[in-house]
């Protein structure tokens, strides 16, 4: 009897689902009967708005009346100063850590409170994720602006219709498994709304880790996909996050802290000023405070955030999880699941290809990782993610080096079916044949991760891949070669070219008129092309700006003399006293005062 009832219920449920799908009203003009599948953008870390709420569920506002973002933390300077002032004064007076570490750790916990997760890896902060549970066509102007600022796919929207473009927003500090489940449901929603039986997905950066989970936990989704266009995907995390979870930070070495770490992250004079101020503490005290605060950040905040664990490379996972998750079995069970998805990433992507899904990959290279962790130079990178992660296991030389004159591409027969293909980059840095999809991976030289969306060639390529079937591989058109370069022609388009076109050439000498015409033609040709080499944009801009300056349309760019007060003082301190604190050497504070006056005047 129970079996009979179960069968009847199953039939009823199945019929109900069929009815819903069969009679649901689609929201697209094509009713699912066009050749372009809807595209779902799965953005990167911090590319979804997450707002802080008060206890009543209302938005927290800053002094200007703007909503307060939870990414990456919420800093209340007014509350921080009273908490740290007394410990700072006591520590400076005693030259010992008198509550400073404790106070700073409290500041870290307060700042990241909205992003804290519990023992189940669930976010406990009072937050609201700004989600778009509808196509861009139904978004408000504000929502469209948010979406297009992150990934400017306006041309795709024009070609396919805004009712074919969706943006899957999620909490970057949320639960990895829950986010993957939401994405799966989102895909089903988009299919129902548009009438299409398949969709295209665009995993970007951290979105690559979400896609890993999607293919692993919901393998049936492969039948829902027409194309997957990865853009700088974190398929094997980022070495920066691996160093975070293993506490392998560069700034633990105070020698590096005072001579290189900060200069790579900010303006040099600002960095040197911080270095001078930091010397108020003894070397050992400063190192101890930094370690204590780092421990707090990793153990009290990051350890429970399963979405961040999705950015931990597989090579770091065993060590990191053993050290941090031994007493967190519920979280470890989830991170172990994702670790398996990470291990299966290439296999699952290959299964996609074998099923007929078109998979493309767009990556950047030859920009060193931020100098946060000691693994910063273990692989080529785009500044944020190492290349072997984004490019599916590709082999490359380190930034600033080459593969060598005698290098021969390694895996043409294994990953590429055509042995005549040459997959070595023109600069002899990347052997694309060693990546999983050598015929479908496009590389952009010297392109930084965070500026990827400002590279018009990358956006144009992604648009063509999503909206048309013109490009089947890296050999389809010379407009989009396998190896391209960094570019951002906004200054040319918005400023220099319009200025050049507005010039009355009749008042110019023949020589200047000819040069202006040639420089303008070169600039327009560059803007209208999609292929370039590293440094070409600067050459084009310099030529056009040069003639505009010569004929008096623009003022010459006069570079301001860099401020050197704190730079000179910091370098003098390092050269003469290493990493010692100012009060560790008798009489040094007076010498610093004298040097400060000397460098200032």
Image (spheres, grey):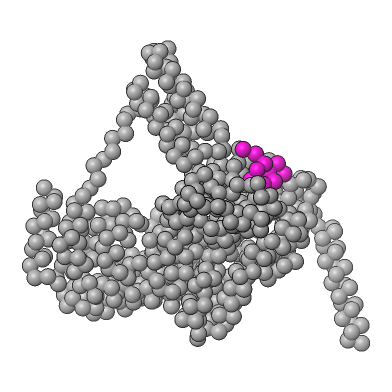
Q: Can residue 78 be found in the magenta stretch? A: no
Report the magenta residues as a range: 464-478
**Residue at 47% of width from left, 65% of height from top?**
239
**Residue at 18% of width from left, 60% of height from top?**
575
Residue farthest to the front, as pictured:
406
Is 97 above or below relative to 259? below
Q: Does residue 80 appear left or right of residue 601 in this picture? A: right
Is 176 above or below relative to 559? below
Residue 478, image x and y in percent?
A: 62, 38
Q: Can residue 467 be found in the magenta stretch? A: yes
Residue 197: in sight, yes or no? Answer: yes
Tell me the quarter of the picture where residue 84 sits: bottom left
Can you say which quadrant of the picture contains the N terminus? bottom right
Q: Nearer the viewer, residue 301 or 327?
A: 327
Residue 87: in sight, yes or no? Answer: no
Q: Nearer the viewer, residue 436 or 244?
A: 436
**Residue at 47% of width from left, 55% of height from top?**
397
Tell me the quarter of the picture where residue 245 sits: bottom left
Q: Does residue 253 appear left or right of residue 137 in this picture? A: left
Residue 399, image x and y in percent?
A: 43, 54
Q: Does residue 481 appear left or right of residue 199 in this picture? A: left
Q: How many marks?
A: 0
Residue 599, image x and y in percent?
A: 13, 51
Q: Main secondary structure of the magenta part?
A: loop
Residue 164, image x and y in percent?
A: 70, 49
**Residue at 49% of width from left, 66% of height from top?**
53
């Amino acid at each position: 009897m129970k079996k009979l009832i179960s069968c009847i219920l199953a039939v009823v449920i199945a019929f109900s689902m069929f009815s819903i799908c069969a009679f649901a009203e689609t929201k697209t003009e094509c009713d699912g009967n066009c050749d372009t599948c809807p595209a779902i953008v799965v953005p990167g870390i911090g590319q979804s708005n997450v707002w802080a709420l008060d206890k009543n569920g209302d938005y927290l506002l800053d002094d200007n009346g703007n909503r307060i973002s939870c990414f990456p933390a919420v800093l209340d300077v007014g509350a921080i100063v009273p908490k740290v002032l007394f410990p700072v004064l006591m520590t400076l007076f005693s030259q010992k850590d008198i509550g400073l570490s404790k106070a700073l750790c409290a500041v870290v916990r307060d700042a990241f409170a909205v992003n804290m997760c519990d023992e189940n890896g669930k976010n406990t902060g009072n937050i609201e994720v700004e989600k778009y549970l509808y196509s861009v066509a139904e978004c408000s102007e504000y929502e469209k602006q948010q979406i297009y600022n992150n990934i400017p796919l306006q041309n795709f929207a024009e070609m396919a219709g805004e009712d074919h473009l969706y943006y899957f927003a999620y909490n970057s500090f949320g639960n990895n498994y829950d986010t993957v489940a939401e994405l799966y449901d989102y895909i089903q929603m988009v299919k129902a709304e548009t009438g299409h039986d398949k969709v295209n997905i665009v995993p970007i950066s951290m979105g690559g880790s979400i896609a890993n989970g999607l293919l692993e936990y919901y393998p049936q989704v492969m039948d829902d996909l027409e194309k997957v266009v990865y853009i700088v995907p974190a398929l094997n995390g980022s070495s920066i996050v691996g160093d975070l979870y293993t506490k392998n930070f560069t700034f633990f070495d105070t020698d590096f802290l005072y001579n290189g770490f900060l200069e790579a992250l900010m303006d040099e004079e600002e960095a040197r000023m911080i270095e001078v101020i930091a010397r108020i503490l003894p070397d050992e005290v400063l190192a101890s405070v930094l370690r204590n605060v780092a421990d707090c950040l990793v153990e009290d905040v990051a350890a429970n955030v399963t979405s961040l664990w999705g950015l931990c490379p597989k090579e770091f996972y065993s060590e990191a999880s053993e050290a941090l998750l031994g007493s967190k079995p519920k979280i470890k069970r989830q991170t172990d699941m994702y670790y398996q998805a990470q291990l299966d990433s290439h296999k699952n992507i290959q299964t996609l290809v074998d099923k007929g899904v078109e998979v493309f990959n767009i990556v950047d290279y030859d920009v060193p990782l931020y100098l946060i962790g000691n693994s910063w130079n273990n692989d080529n990178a785009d500044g944020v993610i190492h290349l072997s992660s984004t490019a599916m296991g590709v082999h490359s030389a380190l930034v600033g080096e080459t593969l060598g004159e005698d290098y021969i591409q390694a895996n043409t027969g294994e990953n590429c079916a055509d042995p005549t293909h040459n997959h070595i980059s023109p600069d002899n840095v990347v052997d694309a044949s060693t990546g999983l999809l050598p015929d479908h991976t496009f590389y952009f030289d010297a392109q930084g991760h965070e500026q990827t969306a400002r590279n018009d060639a990358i956006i144009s390529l992604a648009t063509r891949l999503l909206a048309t079937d013109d490009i089947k591989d890296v050999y389809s058109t010379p407009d989009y070669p396998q190896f391209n370069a960094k570019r951002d022609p906004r200054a040319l388009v918005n400023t220099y070219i319009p200025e050049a076109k507005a010039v009355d050439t009749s008042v110019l000498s023949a020589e200047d008129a000819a040069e202006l015409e040639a420089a303008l033609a070169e600039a327009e040709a560059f803007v209208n092309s999609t292929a370039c080499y590293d440094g070409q944009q600067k050459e084009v801009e310099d030529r056009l700006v040069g003639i505009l300056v010569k004929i008096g349309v623009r003022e010459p760019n006069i570079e301001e003399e860099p401020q050197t007060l704190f730079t000179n003082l910091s370098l003098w301190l390092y050269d003469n006293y290493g990493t010692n604190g100012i009060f560790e050497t008798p009489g040094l504070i007076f010498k610093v005062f004298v040097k400060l006056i000397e460098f200032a005047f």
